[in-house]
Image: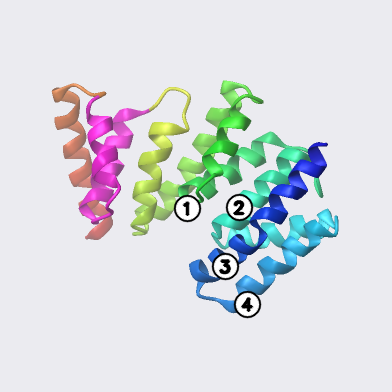
Amino acid sequence: MRLRYFLIIIALLCVGHIARAENHSQSPKLAEEFAIAVKNVESKNFLEAVRSFDKLAQSGLPEAQFNLSLLYSSGLGTPKNYKTALYWSWQAHLNDHPTAINQVNEIFDLITEALRDTVANQIIDELLTIAKAGDQTSALKLGKTYNDLLVAPDYQSAYVWLSIAQAYGLESASELLSQVADELTLEEILVQQEKASTTFSEINS
C-alpha cells in the first residue's frame, strides 16, 4: 500500500515537477534528466532513480531533492535512511519546494531529537562555508535552519544571518527577522546586530 501511495504521488506530480525543473534550471538537459529519473520510478527501476535524483539533487534542484528524500524514507532504490531523507527534504524546503515541509514534519516523528540536531548542524556547517564565500541566498537558508530545524532554535545566530539576508535585499528575510527578534531581549538584539555588521563586512570586503 505504501509503495502504491508513493507511486501515485510521483505520477500526480510528474508533469508539474518536470515543468518546474526546466524553469528553475533554464536547462533543457536538466529537465530531460529529471524526466528520465521519474520514468525510472514509474518503471520501478528505483536504483537508477536514486542515482539520477541524487545527481540532480546535488545540483540544487528542489524537485529532485524532494523525490530523493521520498526514496530514502521509503527504502526504495536504497536502504531506508531517515537521516538522509531529512537532509534532502530540508534542502528541498530551503529551495522553496512547496510541499517539502510536510515531508520534513513526517520525518521528525520518526527520528530522535539528537538525530534531528545532527542533520541541522551538518547543513549549518555546509551553509556557513557557502555563505562566507559570498553566496547571498545561503544567508537566508542559514537563518531558517537556525530557527526551524534545530530542536532548540538558535535565535541569536538566526538573527545574525537573517539580518545579513535582509541587507542583501532578500524579500522574505524581513518578516522572519521580525519573528526571531520577538524571541530576543533588546540587549541580545543589539549584540547580534554588531555581529551581523562585522560578518557582513568580512564577507563583502
Q: Is residue 143 left or right of residue 114?
A: left
Which amino acid type is marked by label 3? Ala
Q: Which residue is mark 4?
A: 29
Tag 1 and tag 2, C-beta contact below 8 Å = yes
Q: Which residue is mark 1?
A: 95
| Residue 79 visible here | no
Look at the numbered disc 1 and give the secondary structure of its residue: loop
Please tell me whether the stretch drawn in magenta is mainly helix, strand or loop. helix
Tally the numbered discs. 4
- Nearer to us of marks 3 and 4 is 3
Q: Nearer the viewer, residue 196 or 179?
A: 179
Tag 1 and tag 3, C-beta contact below 8 Å = no
- Which residue is depicted at the point 68% across and 70% down? 33
Instruction: Measure the C-alpha gap from mark 2 to mark 4.
Output: 17 Å
Residue 119: where, in percent of width, then height? 56, 36
Q: Quadrant of the N terminus?
A: top right
**Are there few (<14), some (14-19), or many (20+) residues within 10 Å of tag 3?**
few
Q: Is residue 155 left or right of residue 190?
A: right
Instruction: Judge whether residue 4 is colored magenta.
Output: no
Which amino acid type is marked by label 1? Asn
Q: Which residue is mark 3?
A: 19
Which sits earlier in the primary sequence, circle 3 or circle 4? 3
Q: Which residues are magenta?
A: 154-182
Which sits earlier in the primary sequence, circle 1 or circle 4? 4
- Which residue is depicted at the point 62% across and 22% down? 112
Look at the numbered disc 3 and give the secondary structure of its residue: helix
Which sits earlier in the primary sequence, circle 1 or circle 3? 3
